[in-house]
Image (cartoon, grey):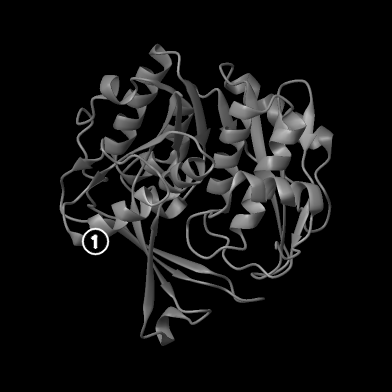
Amino acid sequence: MKKIITFGELLARFSTIDSDRIKQSNHLKVDFGGAEANVASSLAQFGEKVDFISRVPKNDLTEKALMSLKQFGVNTENILFGGDRLGLYFYEKGEVYRSSKVIYDRSHSSMATIKKDAINWDVIFKDADWFHWTGITPALSKACADTTFIALQKAKERGIKISGDYNLRKNLWNWGKSHTEIMPELLQFCDIMSGIHPNIDITKQDATKHDFKKAGDEMLEKYPNCKLIVFTSRGSYSASHNTWSGTIYDGKNVYTSFKYDITHMIDRVGGGDSFMAALIYALRNYEDLQYVVEFAAAASTLKHLTKGDTNICTVQEVEELIQNKSGLIQR
């Protein structure tokens, strides 16, 4: 089996208990994740062979973080050690009309201070046929942007399929360049990418197939190497109640999934990561693009009903949701 490579920052997540606010809480729960680590963990649970690549400090917090990846079957042997600190973020879960909040503490982390030539991509990409990255990594520092570019060049030279998730985090782009200056150069390498959503308020009206086709055609014209554009559609009625669906456009046809009504959301962090992981798995294992998008939407719906960054579910559980659209007890 050929392996999948994901590359990004491993994070420690500190969350308030239940729905406490950070300002009132005296206790925080620690979990581990990060966009690309979340993708790796999901794929490993689906049975794929996955390597996660990052740079981390050598300390006990890191060991705990690596254990969280290993328990799902992610290979961490090629992670670099160096630098002084693990990236952190603090999460306050919203309820109804009170929005969720994220506070980043990632400046000068081990990943942000990586040297652009620190990773031997020829070794990393041996026996790999897929590389996944997100726009979060180049947002961290110039060195991270340069390293991502080198990785993409190496992957393309080897004929490795490349998927990218734009994952815009405006609060992270503070090293001197904006995402509009850096991302186009990186997106040109992608075979599959997340698209810019049609300008539709999906709490008031659904985006039509024409809307998705128009947005997809604009992306494909701008990035001719790309073969598939994917979209996720979130209708946010409140912090606790969202709708969720996915769409794939292949340049000819628009494939849109069932729209899930998530009335009692538990944790939306990692929703997009779980969608991309399930999409990658489905593209590698199924031919029907309609089923591919159904699988991705169903898997990421389950993530919204799971605490923490990581989507903890199996292929069978995803298939059951696609078939039954229910939460009946499994006995």
In the rendered image, the quadrant that contains the C terminus is: bottom right
Structural crowding at the residue carrying mark 1, measured as other residues with C-alpha within 10 Å and reported as few (<14), some (14–19) or many (≥20): some
Residue 144 in the image: state x and y as whole percent. 30, 37
**Residue 289 visible, this orientation:** yes
Residue 11 in the image: state x and y as whole percent. 34, 55
Residue 76 quadrant: top left
Identify which residue is drawn at 42% across, 55% down. 171
Identify which residue is drawn at 39% across, 20% down. 155
Q: How many marks do you count on the picture? A: 1
Name the amino acid, label 1.
Answer: Leu
- Which residue reaches farthest front? 331
Residue 210 quadrant: top right
Residue 100 in the image: state x and y as whole percent. 54, 69
Task: Please give the residue where the numbered disc 1 appears in the rendered image.
Answer: 61
* Viewer-proximal residue among 8 and 294: 294
Q: Is 228 left or right of 146, judged from the image as shown? A: right
SS under mark 1 = helix
Q: Is 314 left or right of 254, judged from the image as shown? A: left
Looking at the image, residue 120 lies above or below residue 80 = above
Q: Is 85 left or right of 289, judged from the image as shown? A: left
Residue 265 in the image: state x and y as whole percent. 65, 67
